Image (cartoon, rainbow, N blue to C red):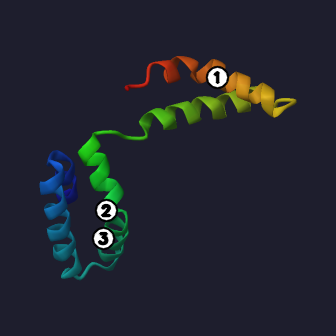
Amino acid sequence: MNLQQLFAKDANTAARFLVRWNAWVQVSDLGPMKKLARTIMAKSKGILRSIETGLSNGVLEAINGNVQAAKRKAKGYRSKRNLKAIVYLIAGDVLENLPT
């Protein structure tokens, strides 16, 4: 729960908070938390970049979910060209309304 505070901070404050949080976890006796902290610190550039830009991959995940659903419904397409056409039909509205 302590780590959730990270996403309420601006980019500079978030970077300092992340370093302090990692130091706090490393002195604890919780092995799984230490492993989590190492993983988060390895991905810290991407985490901080997403905080700075305010962007996420939510739109891509939504498109992927729709494409996977279409594949399941159709049980395969005869060619990759047909699959691409269906993907554009499904995701076309989403792709046109992306923020610029």
| Horizontal relation, residue 16 to residue 89: left or right | left
| Horizontal relation, residue 69 to residue 39: left or right | right
- Say above or below: 4 vs 94: below
Determine which quarter of the picture holds residue 77: top right
Secondary structure category for the residue under label 1? helix
Which residue is label 1 attached to? 88
Q: Residue at x 85, y 31 (%)?
A: 79
Secondary structure category for the residue under label 2? helix
Percent from the top left, x then y, of residue 2?
17, 59
- Looking at the image, the residue that sits furthest to the right is 78
Q: Does residue 75 appear in the picture of this structure?
A: no
Select label 1 or label 3 by which is in front.
1
Of residues 89 and 1, the one nearer the viewer is 89
Could you tell me if the residues under marks 1 and 2 are in contact, i.e. CB atoms within 8 Å?
no
Percent from the top left, x then y, of residue 38?
34, 73
Q: Amino acid at mark 3?
A: Ala
Percent from the top left, x then y, of residue 25?
21, 74
CA distance for labels 2 and 3? 10 Å
First in sequence: mark 1 vs mark 3: 3
